[in-house]
Image (cartoon, coloured by chain):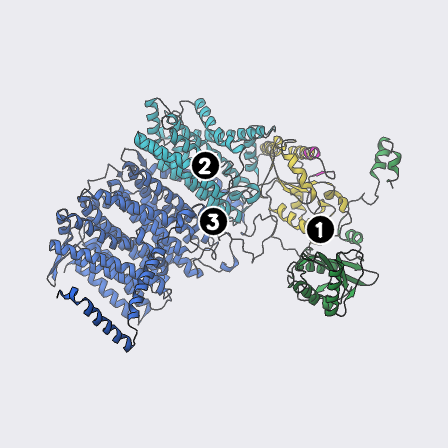
Chain colours: A yellow, B blue, C cyan, D green
Amino acid sequence: MINDKNSQKIVDIIQNWARKQSIWVLAYGTGCGAIEIPPTMTSRYDAERLGVRGAATPRQADVLLITGYLTTKTLKRVIRVYEQMQDPKYVIGFGSCTINGGMYYDSYNTIKVLDKYLPVDVYINGCMPRPESVLAGFGKLQELIGNGEANGATKYKENLEWYRANQKKIIPNWVMPEYNW
Amino acid sequence: MEMIYLIFIIFLGGAVATYLLGKINGVLRDITFLATLIVPAVLFYTQVSIGQTVDFSMSGMNLQWGITDFGYIFAYIVLGLGVLAGIYAVAAMKGKENLGFFYSNYILSIMAMMGILFSRDLVSFFIFWEIMTWSSYLMVVFSGKDVQKVGIKYFIFSAVGAYAMLMAIVTTYSLTGSMMIDSLVTAYPGFDFSMQLLIPILLLIGFGVKSAMMPLHVWASGSYSHAPMAYTAVFSGALSKMGIYGMIIVIVSLVSQIPEGHWFREVIAWLGGITAVGGTLWAVAQDDAKKLLAYSSVAQLGYIIVGVGVGTPLAMLAALFMAVMHGLFKGTLFMAVGAIEKQTGTTNFTEVTGLIRKMPLTFLASLMSIIALAGIPPLGGFIGKWMLYESLVGSDHYMLVIVVFFSSTAAFLYCYKFLFGFFLGQEEPEWAHVKEAPAMMVVPMIIMAIGSFILGVFPGLILNPIDAGLQELGYASTQGRYWEMSMLFNEWGDKVVLQPILYTIIAVFVFFFVFVVAKNFKKTRYVSTKDISSSGEIPKAHENLTFSRGFFQPFLRAVEPLMKHQIDPLYTGFGRGMEAIFDFVRRIYTGNGQTYALYAIIFAVLLLIFKNQLFGL
Amino acid sequence: MELLTHILGAIATVILAFVVGMSYGGIVRKITARVHNRIGPPWYQNFIDAFKLYGKTTAIHHGWMQIMGPAFLMVSSVVTLMFIPVLTNGGWFPNLNFEGDLIFLLYLMVFGPLGMALGAGQTGNPNSAIGVTRGLSQMVGFEIPWVMALVALMIQFDTTSITGLMEAQAQSGTWNMFSSPFAFIAAVLAMLGMFRYSPFDIVGAPTELASGPVSENGGKYLFTMMSSGSIFAFVKLTLYVDIFMGGADNLVILLLKTFSIYMIPVLYGIVSPRYRTEQAIRFFWGWPLFFGVLALIYASIF
Amino acid sequence: MQQLKANLIEHIKTSFKDAREKDYPNENRLDFYVNKQCIPSILTYAKDRLGYIHLSHIAIVDWLEDGEIELIYIIWSPEEKIKMFVRTRVERENSVMPNIDMIWRQANTYEREFREMYGIQFQGLEGEQDFLLEDWDGPPPMRRDFDTEAYADDTFFHRPGREDAQDVREAITKRSGEEIPDFAKKYSR
């Protein structure tokens, strides 16, 4: 009964519903994007009504919200934070900088394409994206989770070598604990 | 031959033999040492019956030895702790120098304590008391560190206590013409009031020093932390209880006979309460485990003194139960500190961290003892605390119960500090090599921890002899009224039933253990304590992230006004003043013949001037 | 058979406490949101969060003690619940109401936080330990007025058991909050600290301490802590209702009374900033202590 | 003010023979070129004798055409209210500057930054670990001959579609037929 595929499916549906309704966000506030988070959370836009809520540490968080450009120095920390998060976990790339480098397209120390290094589930476009688009992004993520399509973490796990190769290319001194869960 | 003599002969002979064998062979010495502890203990429990006495005469004084019901309780503590700590000591002191001296001293201490419990007359009581003091003094200075500061402090306070006691004994003899404790008790109500006040106060100074009562506790922190830990377990666990033993006899048998005794007891109870608060607050402020436990001992003895001072049957039960429990858990904790000191070489919380995975059994014993110390059910410390509170509330000591409660709540702080400081927190590579202590050290700790667990569920086991002892002191039987095998009642008949509580806790625990913890634990994998969420940073191996300095700083800031007043400076000031006077006196002797001649002339002149007044001519 | 009903009743009590505590938590979030002029999450949001946390994988541990910590907390909450008379006449929840008394309860309630503190210590995160030390220090602060209030009640009614206090209230016909008002005030002021809403929430301050003791715990650990926290909240509220408001005859009255008393720390907390630890301690040793002393004097005179 | 300035110049010129004054119209400013070996001594002298107790800034200019790098130590005397610029030039390649962080502790931060960003070495500079650039193995990035775009192209991934550099406004015009106002056209590419 428990190992029955159909019952597992039902459990998945319920769990996906719960995951969708309860999104605890760890905002990695690099760059200017962090300033868009307070209005999103406070009374004007009130993300909490959608179940979106801040988490204090990566262990508790579901969503890693990367708000802006990542230098090679911060990328190391972001990878670390992402690997400390517990499954199921999602990544939202926030702002143009995470998509294609934005205004830092020719900078010598910021990465341009986040999804080469971390599995991004949802991108929120804009420089900066307004709180409305942030909410839209969360809505999209909820939709993906509800359909069981937000499987970035699985992708990361399966293609770990590819991601590692990309990461190590710009972080030559690689000292990081093993990632094996 | 009388069994009582035999016990003492074994003790004495063992002490000498261990000392001598210590020069020849280590193994033989250890075996003799353990035998000297275990054989008398076995003899005592099997052959000596309560009430059995031996009389003899020495230089014209009649002396009497024999064990009473009341002394029997303390004999449990002394012999039980003595044997277990002795086994521990053999492993703990291995490789130290001058061990024969240590062991024979240890045996002498145990013998002296047994002697105190056996003494039915004041002379042998005093002699054994002095042997105890001397042997413990030699233990305090055994390590040879800070002898000036710590040893002298202990020595001076013990000496003052002993002189006070001697004065009381001599006064008693001059008043009654007998050295028997019983005759003092019977003659006491007939004394005049100043004597009725003087004798207990003098005796209490003597006993208060050993039981670290408030103004006389100054020696305790230093001495407890400087003696070898194997001995401190006995020092704090059993030896300090001798002060309690004497104190109970003084307060219950003597002072309670007169109407003013009520106020006397109140003062003692409040002194105990202040001792508890002061000891606790200073314990919270310590960074060294030995010091922390030393101050904690002072605080715990404070609770016992509160119980003794209040003196209702329930309070006496509480005090004696706590005395037994304190021997158990504080002995374990001192042993644990000794084990950690042996394995790491330091006892400072700011240096040692993260030993839980290296010394799991020591941690387990410490955890159980700490739970007992904090008074959390279902371990034994709770029983004593519960009875103390109920007795305080029941006997209208409303402010005192708040004071005691404050102290015991603040005790959680140092309890956590002890566990966190040593066992939890970051695992530093510096201590990666640390192994669990040898079995001979761990087993006594575990036995005692289990003992405090059993007493927490079946307090009747130890309340039974306590009850017999209290009846000896003139209390009515309390069994059925205040306690049963695993039930407690207060003055108003409200009860705590311990067994269902234990079963509930075990049932819920097992449920979570099986269904949540164990299942989870298997599925998860261990990560080191460097793998923590520290803002995405990866702490390097040498980066020390342990939080151990200024551990309770906010709390200490809040209670700063309470801790501003210390008794130490007063004593130091007194000492300085005396020194100044002596110094002045010394200056008279300049060593110069001219000056002496001048003195003689001045003296003659003064004689001449005042001769009329002096000689009435 | 009797044992079976007892066990079933106990399970029912735990479920009730869990549901009520969780719902209250959700309602508090809603109320907080309304005070902030937000819409806020639905009242059942806490259930969703808990379910999601339970569904998360928990792949790591820092040692036995980290897992035992939440278990300690849960055991403490459940066992404490067993000793609280949920309804005045025992009713459906007989449990162990008559086996313990208030002082026993005071010490039992410390069991969980201590175990939790050990669990937090095992993780090795300095923030956890800092949070724990703050929590323990704060506890010393609020326990004093709280114990004063309890002692005042004990000497007023010559009993230390909760059922005894409830019977005394039933006999006199007035609630203790009216017959011994100072004790009630002291206890309520102590309750502000006990629930750890602001201004006394420095223990798990999310931004400066990274949520303190729970900072290394996610997934199932956090689920266990969250649910036992909810049960514990229900325990405390029921205890207050039992000893100050005469208990409750049925569930509706119980819910009404607990909710109304729950609103005191919640509404005070919503509009308050945060105290530092020593400020919090001094707060409790100010007016609450004064009312505690008044309560003691009042109780020993009358 | 002029008198004061003249005094200061004289003081410095008598003490340091190779100091060349750089004329500058601003009246509360002194400007010198000195040799790099003189830097610690002239700064110490200014700090101890002339009351220039405050190091405002250390500026750096990359004179690519001259093959030199110029360091400008800007110090300030709160009593005389005159800024002093002490300039020195060193070779771009393989040059070692004297270290002044024992005179002003805060100079350490500037010097570590210059070391990383311009590749200038300082004698006996503390702090071997990386300061701003972690894991950097390229050339010093703030030099003028460092081609940041080429480096970025070389090192990082780029998202396709980025290179065409289309004007957003034109793209919108094409898509939805919106007119671009005349004044805006000159900004379009």
**Disc number lying in front (2 or 1):** 2
**C-alpha separation, residue under disc 3 versus residue under disc 2:** 21 Å
Pointers 1 and 3 within a single chain? no
Asked whether residue C23 is drawn in magenta, I would say: no
Q: Position of residue A67 (x, y in %)?
A: 68, 42
Give the vertical position of D100 relative to B561 (above or below): below
Task: Name the residue that disc number 2 marks.
Answer: C194
The answer to whether the residue labelled 3 contacts the one labelled 2, judged by CB atoms less than 8 Å apart, is no
Q: Amino acid at mark 3?
A: Gln
Q: Amino acid at mark 1?
A: Asn
Label 1 neighbourhood size at 10 Å, few (<14), some (14-19), many (20+)? some
Decide whether residue A123 is among the magenta residues: yes
Amino acid at dot 2? Met
Pick whichever, B120 or B585, lies toward us: B585
Q: Which residue is mark 1?
A: A166
Residue under label 3, please give it: B553
Chain letter for mark 1: A
Q: Quadrant of residue B231?
A: bottom left
Instruction: From the viewer's perspective, tell me whether residue A59 is left or right of residue B80.
Output: right
Q: Quadrant of the N terminus of chain D?
A: bottom right
At 23% across and 73% down in the image, what residue appears?
Answer: B600
Tell me which segment is drawn in magenta.
A119-135
Q: CA distance from mark 1 to mark 3?
A: 47 Å
